Structure formats: C-alpha cells, structure tokens
Amino acid sequence: MKILITGGSGMVGRNLIEFLHENSNYQLHYPTSNELNLLDNRTVLKYLQNGNFDAVIHCAGLVGGIQANIQRPFSFLHLNLQMGVNIIDAAINCMVPKVVNLSSSCMYPKDSEGTLREQDILTGRLEPTNEGYAIAKIAVSKLVEFAKKEFNLDYKTIIPCNLYGKYDKFDLETSHMIPAVIRKLHTAKLVNQKVEIWGDGTARREFMYAEDLADFVQFAINNYDKLDTYTNVGLGYDYSILEYYIAIAEVVGYTGEFEFDLSKPTGVKKKLVSVDKQTFLGWKPKHTLSSGLHLTNNYFIENYGI
C-alpha cells in the first residue's frame, strides 16, 4: 500500500512514520514542507496526481498550547484550514480510496457534560482560548464527512485526546502542557525553585502517549471499513492538572513546591473523550501515564542535554 503522510516533521507525524516503518510493510511518502507546500492548492493536487496513492494520512498542522493559541488565533484558523482544504480537495480530485484525517478533541463544545461523544460536535460553544484551531479542525472534518455524501468517498476522521511523547516541542512558549512541565521541572530542580501552575490545578485532562495514536492509525488503515466517519481515540480516563504535575515531578525527581497563578486561564474544566467506538473495535492504548512519561522524559534528557 502506498501512503502519503502529511506533517511528517511534527510530533504526531514523526511518531507515526517511525511506528509504521517498524510495524508494517507500507510504502510511505512523507515530503517535507520544501518538497510539498500544503498551502498551495495546485502544488498539492499535482503531487497527488503524480503519486497514485492508495491512502492519505493528514496530520500536518500548526499546533501549540494555550498561550500560542491565544496569541495567534488567525494563524491557527487560517493555516490549518488552508492545509486541510487543499489535501482533502486533492484527494477527492484524485479519487484516493482512503483518507485518514487526524483532528483534535478541541472540536467539542467547552461545556459538554460527561464524556465527549462524536455526535456532540457543533452542539455548543467552543473554548475561546483555542477557538481558531477548533474551527479549522471542524471545517476540515466536515469536508471529510461531505466527501462521502457528494462523491461517495468514504473518508475518516480520527479525533485523538491530547497527546505527548517523543519529538514533542519542549519550549515554554508554544508547547503543550506535558512537555512544558517536563522542562519547567528540570529547570526548577537545577536551581531549587518553586514551580508555577496556571489556574488552580483542578481542570482535568486526558493525555495519551503519541505512539499509541500511531498504533491506532495503523489499526484504522487495516480495518478501514469498520470505522465510522468520526472515531475518538483516547484512554477513557483523565487526571487533574495538579496530578499531572505530581506524576511528572516523580519522574523528573523534582521535590520542590508548587504555587498556583489564579490570574492565568485554566481552560475547560474537563475534556474526556468517549472511547466506546474504539473499545467496540477491539483496540486500546498500550502505555500507562507512568510508562509514557518515563519514555518522554528520557527523550528530553537525551536530546536537550539536561
């Protein structure tokens, strides 16, 4: 099977490529942004026309944590929407049989009660701190859905919970929570200082090790016809922000104190995806929080010299 993977230089893409190389005999193509400009519709269409791909896995995108999303809402909406439109449009024009679009749980309404079910999309207001990114992800997922209605192309959207792992960003300005906290705690450990937590630490989040998502993507390609148009992927349980800090502190070896900055945004109080569909399909993630954190911390130490 000949597969095009977009976003191969990002954290999700790199984990996916590494996993598929080790666990499959697919013929993988993962062009860099210099080789394939996803913001240029004609370039994308020509690349797919020449490639004769059996499947496309779309995981390219501009990503970042709360601070980055607050500072650059236009960019998060515009760039992610443009990339998604171009790749789905080209796939339709080339009649690519399989498309797996990797989306985000930020698509869900911010005030949803209980677990987030696939049918909850567009039933309420979005979280303001990442509204631009969420709108782009919803729009691209709707293109995937409408490809079946209009062109009889049964494309799929996978909606993972929050992710972390090898190849993640570890800078404090743009990274997601877990890699940022790993770096913060290592730095605080070296200088023996307190660590600041945004908000009150009670908001709950679900973070899955990125290699588990790669495992599910391979499962999805191999069991493509069994998947619905939308499928959540996650752990099925969550932890509070404070619990994540405590778990990461144990892995890092940080024994200092935490202090809460109540002037900073906390985000939605709870974001836990329903895993009923993945459970029905017979798949579950392999990594615990502890094992995933140890692997990610080891990667950070090996690559950032701390």
Image: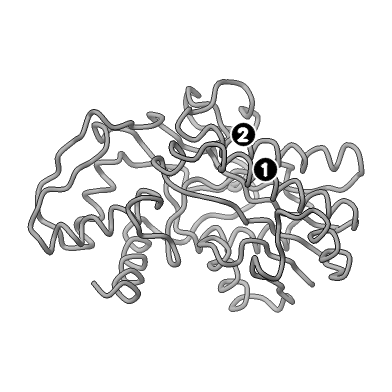
How crowded pointer 2 is (Cα within 10 Å; few <14, some 14-19, many 20+) is rated as many
Give the Cα distance between marks 2 and 1: 8 Å
Q: Residue at x 52, y 37 (%)?
A: 73
Residue 206: % across, % down: 42, 44
Sequence order check: which comes first, mark 2 or mark 1? 1
Relative to 83, say whether 115 is above or below. Answer: above
Image quadrant where residue 218 sits = bottom right
Q: How is the image coloured?
A: one colour
Q: Do the residues under discs 2 and 1 have CB atoms within 8 angstroms? A: yes
Residue 28: % across, % down: 71, 74
Is 188 situated left or right of 2 in this image? Answer: left
Residue 85: % across, % down: 75, 46
- Residue 135's label in the rendered image is 2
- Residue 81's label in the rendered image is 1
Looking at the image, which is closer to me, 238 or 255? 255
For label 1, the SS is: helix
For label 2, the SS is: helix
Amino acid type indicated by mark 2? Ile
Is 130 situated left or right of 295 in this image? Answer: right
- Residue 189's label in the rendered image is none
Q: Quadrant of the N terminus?
A: bottom right
